[in-house]
Image (cartoon, rainbow, N blue to C red):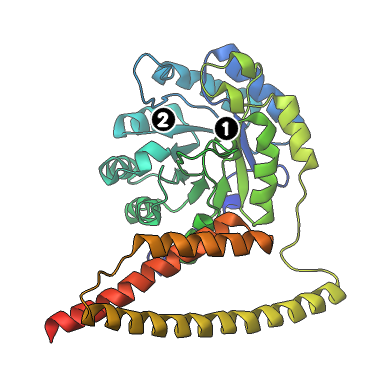
Amino acid sequence: MTAALKLKAIRDWFDVRREPLVIAGPCSAESEEQLFETSKQLVESGAVSAIRAGIWKPRTRPNSFEGIGPHALPWLTRVKEELQIPVATEVANAQHVEHCLRAGIDILWIGARTTVNPFYVQEIAEALKGTDIPVLVKNPIHSDLGLWVGALERLEKVGIQKLAAVHRGFYTDSDAPFRNEPKWEMSFALRAKAPDIPIICDPSHIAGKRNLVEQVSQTALDINLDGLMIESHITPEKALSDAAQQLTPADLVSMINRLILRSSEPRNENAHLELDQLRTKIDGLDQQIVNLLKDRMDLVREIGQIKVDNDISIFQMDRWFEILAKRGLQGKELELNTALIQELFQTIHKYSVERQNEVFQNKNRS
């Protein structure tokens, strides 16, 4: 993201009725009655700032419900005009953009399946050139920060200033409670690359199950994301897409009222002092960790030298499995998160192999 990029805060885009900022509505606009009644209940609650509904639904396999298409755009327009609230939908190509601009849709979003392809994003960006419409960009399916940032940059280059990112989680093939792995660290990485970009969480697509949406929503607020984009349907069990993750308007409003908005800084002076003291201790421990890593990498280099002198291969699988098992057991005994230990030592091992490879390369050059 260019250093000169200055974007409007998300709350400048449209009337925000309350905190937290919530964009809500059905996964798909299935009928005019379904969309309007869902929207009406959400708007009357005062809990939402905009209504969302999918018109085009990209699906992996044919014969799945792929949305009503442009025939449903007047339904969104009716919601906008009669309920006096901004409306949003997803676009995946230039033709979608043109339909939405003609219909007066207020907010567009680019889905995860589109963000992965720079050609698609560029086509959408070109179609949006000269407009001032807010555009939300969902993270790509896989955790590729470059694609996410690149999509935002392409839109910024054609003059789109009202931009936000949507954190909707990432594909995983492992058994997990969530449909998509949250990987909250990706939102931190995006903040570092583009600090002016608001980030909205899509807890529906992370959770995949309606009973987990509240948990994900609260986590998103706890890490200071800028709002929520939640799927809601008057009869979720009958929904034609994503039935398991949609909430009724009443349940969504009840959930919103239970969410806790926490301050980013302590208001209590004693808490402030205690945090400073503990953070100072953490800083000391972090310095020790870095020093220990330096000592470990020095030993790795010595091992690499012995291997190259004796024609021993860099990677020994038995030794690697031994390290994982021992450190994993140690972590378990200390009640540390198993995934933390595994990921930590996978990273350490990766750079240990690189360090030994440097020794081999130096030998080859001499």
In space, the residues marked 1 and 2 are separated at their CA atoms by: 28 Å
Identified at 58% across, 38% down, the residue is 178
Contact flag, marks 1 and 2 (Cβ < 8 Å): no
Which one is in front, 334 or 131?
A: 334
Which of the two marks, 1 or 2, is nearer to us in this view?
1
In the rendered image, the quadrant that contains the N terminus is bottom left
Helix or strand or loop: what does disc 1 sit on? Answer: loop
Residue 99 appears in the picture as rendered: yes
Residue 20 image position (x, y, % from top left) = 70, 46
Q: Is residue 241 left or right of residue 257?
A: left
Identified at 45% across, 38% down, the residue is 173
Q: Is residue 242 above or below residue 31?
A: below
Q: Is residue 129 above or below residue 185?
A: above
Image disc number at residue 208: 1
- First in sequence: mark 1 vs mark 2: 2
Q: Is residue 168 left or right of residue 16?
A: left
Image disc number at residue 100: 2
Q: Is residue 202 left or right of residue 360?
A: right
Give the total number of marks visible in the rendering. Answer: 2
Q: Is residue 310 left or right of residue 33?
A: left
Residue 115 image position (x, y, % from top left) = 37, 43
- Mark 1 neighbour density, 10 Å: few (under 14) some (14–19) many (20 or more): some
The amino acid type, in three-letter code, at marker 1 is: Gly
Helix or strand or loop: what does disc 2 sit on? Answer: helix
Identified at 75% across, 36% down, the residue is 255
- Mark 2 neighbour density, 10 Å: few (under 14) some (14–19) many (20 or more): many
